[in-house]
Image: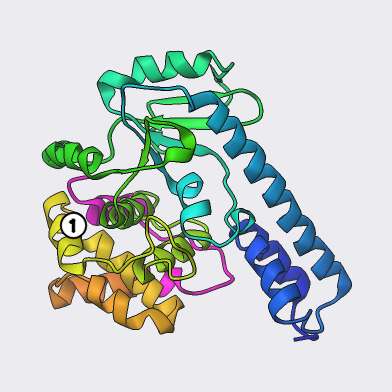
Amino acid sequence: MAQAPWDAYVEWAIAQGLAPLAAYNLEYRLAGAGAPESARDRLLSVYQGSLNDNVMKLVNFKRAVDELEDGRVLLLGAASFAESLYPHVAFRPVPDIQLWAQSDDLPRLVEFLRQSEFRGDSRVDRVRGAAAVLSDRRTEIAIFTHFLGERVRAHEKGVFERALPVKVYGPSIFRPSHEDAILLLCLDQAKAGYEVPMISFVDLRELLSGASALVGSYSKPVDFERLKQRASEWRIDRALYTSASIVQRLFPELEGAAQSAKPTLRASTQRLLEKWVIAKVVQLGPMRILRGTDRWRRLLAGGS
């Protein structure tokens, strides 16, 4: 490994959200592996930066919502996964806080966050269709009101009903149930045309495997039959199949769980997804730009 292309790898790992995990594994599991000091130092600095940044954002968020009552707001994505899927909060970078609130609750939630000096920022791009993006110049909060398409939107109510409390953030913050978290992540990947950082597939790996390194909300076996049934109801069978197939290719040790998660699709659809999406995403290193991304989004996200 001493002769590996470390400079290129470090840049790639940082861009893919993998640098903190790489730093930990390199230093504490591989004893440096002969890597040059410059690469090790840079990865460690990203690890420390991720730790400081995550703690600042999550503590700041807790202070802002700790007294929010009489509602149910879902914590999504990196902010939910950092402590529910990973043994250390530094391992999973948290670029922003993503929340899902029901439409009727949005004005009250925004007004409540304004009391903690969160304001709308015209310079902040809307995050993949967020209804509102607030910032206090240190932490950005993206609030969504819908994730599923209009044809299947009635199923959103069930996501809120099945949600699990995240007591550390107060009485109104919840996270999606295990199967819902998997489907929402697959849907998010599909809506992005699979142009997502590789850490997103590590998130999915941990969800599918039951987060065995922890004892938490997602540290249990997945109900794969329920998962596939719900994917069919949400009309995102192809997204679930594609995401599970990518994880299966990237992490062969997860073949059993990934195979169990994959819904049955027509052979022609499987071949299409394998050639034009899965095979391209699993090519590590090069920038993944899928031709016809908008078309793939429509195909994979289905009713969403």
- At 32% from the left and 46% from the top, the residue drawn is 176
Label 1 packing within 10 angstroms: few (<14), some (14-19), many (20+): many
* Number of numbered discs on residues: 1
- At 75% from the left and 74% from the top, the residue drawn is 27
Q: Is residue 169 above or below residue 283?
A: above
- At 67% from the left and 62% from the top, the residue drawn is 19
Say whether residue 64 is visible: yes
The answer to which image quadrant residue 100 occupies is: top left
Q: How is the image coloured?
A: rainbow
Report the span colored magenta: 276-304
Left or right: 165 as drawn, with respect to 160: right
Name the residue tied to disc 1.
231
Q: Is residue 14 above or below residue 170?
A: below
- Residue 203: x and y in percent read 45, 61
- At 54% from the left and 73% from the top, the residue drawn is 284
Q: Nearer the viewer, residue 109 or 194?
A: 109
Left or right: 202 as drawn, with respect to 154: right
The answer to which image quadrant residue 156 occupies is: top left
- Residue 173: x and y in percent read 39, 34
- Residue 225: x and y in percent read 15, 67
Q: Nearer the viewer, residue 153 or 291?
A: 153
Q: Nearer the viewer, residue 157 or 88?
A: 88
User: Which amino acid type is shown beneath numbered disc 1?
Assistant: Ala
Which residue lies most toward the right here?
37
Helix or strand or loop: what does disc 1 sit on? helix
